[in-house]
Image (tube, rainbow, N blue to C red):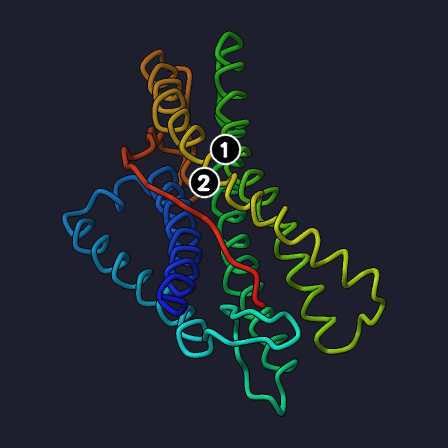
Amino acid sequence: MCKICSSLVSLNLYASIYFITCMSFDRYMVILHPFGSQSEKSLCQARCVIILVWTLALVATFPAIYFRHAQYLENLGNTVCAMVYPPENSNHWSAAMSLMKNTLGFFIPFTVISACYGSVAYHLMRMEVREKNKHKRDKALWMVCAVVLAFFICWLPFHVLTFLDALSKMNFITNCRTITAIDTAMPIVICLGFANSCINPFIYYFMEDHFQVQLTDMAQSGSIKLYNRRNSSTRISSFSHRNNDMRDTDVKNS
């Protein structure tokens, strides 16, 4: 149960973040390349992406599957579910796993999410809209920013503390108060990560319904003109209807 529960938590963490990243790229394609994203191969490609996401999440979870064990701690007089690394270089393994989590679970996904939604926001700002429809475009821009901000605000504190914990394992941070502060704050930032799962459904609800309606209304009234990067032909597109269940969470390595 120690291995199973911890592995499922880790698998869920990576899979959720990777699916959010894929949704960001999908929205980018639908807005900037609407005709290509509606090809007959889209369903097959989506299935391949889903398999790829779960495969990558499983690979990233493998350390938790391999190293997580139930171990008796004499100083506590209790058995704990902990990451048990080779004793000769335990701190190095712990630091490496933390940095891997930072890279695969935050930096790379956040870069992709920011790039995709940044491009979407840029093209929304290039829209030619009538004066009465500017507030609709501005609201749509705020919704785009909300996705990036929610991911950033909810997960940044956790990954900052994870990075600091890695530095402490490598003896770059030796101050006892700082280490104690990291251990004390970790449960709080994990809860903040959970909050991303609570916020995302509301964001995607408004994105899927209100945002699409706003773009459609402006398009039907002839107030939007999206310029192609290759030519000046008009391109009108909307977000695809898709649902996603996300439960972002993680556990602290003991």
When the figure is inspected, residue 152 is found, relative to residue 81, above or below; the finding is: above
* Residue designated by label 1: 144
Q: Which residue is located at x 52 percent, y 68 percent?
A: 80
Quarter placement of the C terminus: bottom right
Question: Residue 54, how many percent across, how many down?
Answer: 31, 62
Question: Residue 219, how many percent across, how many down?
Answer: 35, 19
When the figure is inspected, residue 168 is found, relative to residue 155, above or below; the finding is: below
Q: Earlier in the sequence, mark 2 or mark 1?
A: 1
Q: Which residue is located at x 44 percent, y 52 percent?
A: 17
Helix, strand, or loop for circle 1?
Answer: helix
Mark 2: few, some, or many residues within 10 Å (few <14, many ≥20)?
Answer: some
As drawn, the label of residue 197 is 2
Q: Which residue is located at x 56 percent, y 44 percent?
A: 191
* Three-letter residue code for mark 2: Ser
Question: Residue 95, how many percent across, how many down?
Answer: 63, 75
Position of 57 compared to 103: left or right? Answer: left
Mark 1: few, some, or many residues within 10 Å (few <14, many ≥20)?
Answer: many
> Mark 2 or mark 1, which is nearer to you?
2
Q: Residue furthest left?
A: 40
226 or 250, which lies in front? Answer: 250
225 or 54, which lies in front? Answer: 54
